[in-house]
Image (tube, coloured by chain):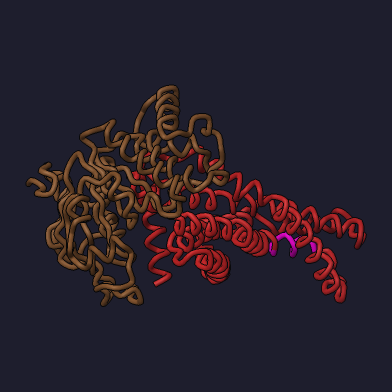
Amino acid sequence: MEVGRVATLAALALANLPVRPFRVRETIRLIGFIGVDSLPIVLLSGLFTGAVFTVESYEAFRLFGAQGLVGGTVGVALTRELAPTLTGLLVAGRAGSALAAELGSMRVTEQIDALHAMAVDPVNYLVKPRVIAATLSVPLLTALFDAVGIAGSYAVAHWELHLSDPEFWIRLRAWVDWADIEAGLIKGTAFGFVIGVVACSRGYHTEGGARGVGLATTQAVVISSVTLLVLNYFIALALAEST
Amino acid sequence: MIDVVTGFAAAIRFEGVTKAFGSHVVLRNLDLLVPRGAITFLIGRSGTGKSVTLKHIMGLMRPDSGRIFVGDDEITAMRERELRATRNRFGMVFQHAALFDSMDVFDNVAFPLREHSRDSEAKVRSRVLDLLASVGLKGAERRAVSELSGGMRKRVGLARALVREPEFLLYDEPTTGLDPVLAAAMDQLILETQRRKPALTSLIISHDMSAVFRIADKVAMLRDGAVVVEGTPQQIRESSDPLVVQFVSGSLLGPIDASQG
């Protein structure tokens, strides 16, 4: 039933894309909330993810004298996997929960019924801008996670592990190509869409007062996080087959 | 069709409407006539189907069987797009006001205009300020919804419902939760609104009997999803029907079992 509800809302949101009003101002506001406001946690997480991955992989590579592989390994792991997945999970936790709670409380306080009563389509007014904002924000945050993650990795390699610059950058440049970055951005886009649709669906279909809002919020985070991890595998599989 | 109680033409008409949720039948072959240009009260205990009736009029719910007419249009035969157009003819005052808490008072009242009309912001502004003044909220336009008292919220809700000059005004328990003085003030506001626009059709869901005797033109009492009694407030007051007598007096003794529902 949950899958059906989410799929129906996703279809309605997509069908609503060309329907006026386009809600540009509201969408920009929501990109601010979902994207810009998530910057601190995404940048901080990116920095330390790059850093810790560098420390751990350096230890492993050092055992057989291949420290030079650290930059390339970290680069590929970050761009293809860690950046989109961790960004998705962070946004699901921070913004997905807030979207579900907002729509949930609008449902239980009859604000969504009021929209219907005023002949305003709640999918157009509430769901469409949120889904668009999430779908655009997550890949952009993913790209920033990439950049900051590599910066964190470089900082540790340079100052902590004393790798020479060529050792770090040559493999990174050789191994990480556009396809890796693109894979991450494709995943980020898909994850953003999932977070937007799941959060809106859980909020929109909230039942039963304050407890219902709490439940919707938790479910939005859990369902979108798990969906995102499962989807990650299938996108990786599809991308591997297409190359 | 003419309403026999008031002698006015029918504005909203239910013909044999039945609605069930699972095995629970909420509306049972309901026949109801709401006259144009008058204030009609739909009374009855909680859970007798009053709110469900309102949702059917707005097309927010569809009956399992039966037909509903708004004017001459059968809304039960309409698709969602036509229903949305019909909803433009309605204003609704929600029980808890259902104001958008992300907006201030002004933006709440302006919302339906901004969504549906191409009026200039200056025109919207003068309309909204006029309406806020008429519901006694002059100077409150920039206040946050969360700062408002229950009575103020309901008045903002009324202003929002009136902003597009609806033909039909539906109130869901407009005085519930208000103290007796505020409730009387709300009744007065409903009456003034009606007098200012004589063609307006007002339907009020309530169990506030003092409001019924103050401002109603017609009263219909629901029980188990059907109208059991209807008439003018005078007829209701003078009724010897034990059901009505018990409901009006709020007595525990009578055909209504207080432990049921």
Write the residue at 23% across / 41% down.
Answer: B201
Drawn side of residue B77 relative to residue A227, left or right: left
Number of marks drawn: 0
Residue lying farthest to the left in this orientation: B1
Check if residue A3 falls in the magenta segment.
Answer: no
Q: Is residue A6 left or right of residue B6?
A: right
Q: Quadrant of residue B191?
A: top left
Question: On screen, B192 above or below B92?
Answer: above
The quarter of the image holding the C terminus of chain B is bottom left
The answer to whether residue A232 is seen in the rendering is no
Among the chains pictured, the one given brown colouring is: B
Q: Colour of chain A?
A: red
Q: Residue at x 60, y 50 (%)?
A: A34
The residue closer to the viewer here, B248 or B4, is B248
Instruction: Give the residue at x 19% y 65%.
Output: B226
- Overall secondary structure of the magenta stretch? helix
Closer to the camera, A180 or A41?
A41
| Residue A64 rendering spot, x and y as whole percentages | 85, 75
Q: Position of residue B164 (x, y in %)?
A: 33, 34
Please determine whether, in this image, residue A20 is positioned above or below residue B203.
above
**Looking at the image, is B201 positioned above or below residue B207?**
above
The answer, for residue A200, to whether it is visible in the render is yes
- When the figure is inspected, residue A171 is found, relative to residue A62, above or below; the finding is above
To which quarter of the image does residue B120 belong?
A: top left
Q: Nearer the viewer, residue B234 or B15?
A: B234
The residue positioned 55% from the left and 49% from the top of the image is A136
Which range is magenta? A69-77
Question: Residue B131 placed where, x, y %?
Answer: 40, 31
In the image shown, does B49 or B81 lie closer to the viewer? B49
Q: Position of residue B126 (x, y in %)?
A: 43, 24
